[in-house]
Image: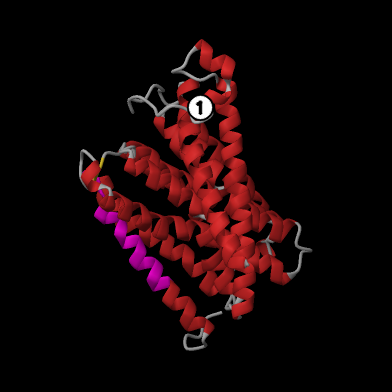
Amino acid sequence: MDVLVLAIAFVVILVGAELFTNGIEWFGRKLELAEGAVGSVLAAVGTALPETMIPIIAIAFGGGGAATDAVGVGAILGAPFMLSTLAMFVTGVGVIAFRKRRATDTRMVVDTTVLVHDIRYFVVAYAIAIGAAFLPPSLAALKYVVAVVLIGIYVYYVKGHLDAEGGNGEGDLAPLRFHRVDRRGYRRDPAVPRLAIVNVQVVAALACIVGGAWLFVGAVDRLAAAAGVSELLLALVIAPIATELPEKFNSLIWVRQGKDTLAMGNITGAMVFQSAIPTVVALVFAGSAWTVTEDSLLAFASAAMAFVAVAVIFGPMWRRARLDGHALLIGGALYLLYLGLVLLAITGILPLG
């Protein structure tokens, strides 16, 4: 039964992702927003909702126990790790798979200014958040200060994207899927939908994404429990794979269409969001769990892996001002490396918590 639920949830998320990419582009066009704002802010925040709900529910509504706090912290750390490794890898595979229908083959036509802007904010915000985990218990009150700083960083980041000059040159958009539902608006203008119906499609898409992810994670949880999978592996690896599906699907849809800045911005923008907002939840409501100890060392090692992925993928892009789909494949190797560490730790071969 759970396998059937997984299949249904997978389809629901896929439909939601297709509706969302189509709707959010029209939303950005109607508001005359820059491409970076559409991909790195609107799309990133929208599709980050499923993985953000897991730590919020686990920490804020899980009874405050050490076990639920640990699961929540694991989910928070797992999201940036998955985005910087597996999501990059899937996007790179998509670029290579769709190279024959892309005008630039495997070279990605991206606005490197947008991506560098995102990565800088991610590195700063995530470094501050991880640094707070090394604070001694006597300075635990500083975690509240760090939480305020992280919110300020993200607000300033969003402001930078929204202040950017709008009117990107992506060309004509695909017809809005819900446009024909708005009969009055369609009769008035068959080509350009009204903002109201664009909003309806975006909300419906988000409902599919969040609902599908909720079904998917629930089924994964039950299957993992039946198989005897540990909570650490579930929180760090399995659950984030499920909840990162919207970002992966969105990016695949956009690279197939040759809209590479939107595809990459959807991931890098989600990385900035995940480095700032969910970590605030941990700092404020589970400060004692947001601490590097022998038991949490393996979980926080995922942050180190995320920083490595960012350095090896975006460092060369920053120097050369270009990005190729093959460069994203390194994310898969780093993901497998960390997964190996987790499995060694769970089996007791590697003495990590």
Secondary structure, mark 1, is: helix
- Identify which residue, 67 or 229, lies in the foreground: 229
- Which of the two residues, 351 or 149, is positioned nearer the viewer here? 351
- Chief SS of the magenta region: helix
Which of the pair 87/23 is nearer the observer?
23
User: Which residue is at a point 54% across and 70% down the rendered structure image?
Assistant: 299
Quadrant where the C terminus lies?
A: bottom right
Q: Report if residue 321 is visible in the image.
A: no
| Residue shown at 46% from the left, 18% from the top | 192
Residue type at the position of mark 1: Phe
Q: Quadrant of residue 107?
A: top left
Q: Tell me the residue that label 1 is attached to.
A: 27
Q: Residue at x 59, y 73 (%)?
A: 224
Q: Which residues are magenta?
A: 319-338
Taking depth in this image into account, of 205 and 280 the one nearest to the observer is 205
Q: Position of residue 206 (x, y in %)?
A: 59, 41
Question: In this rendering, would 183 be left or right of 254?
Answer: right
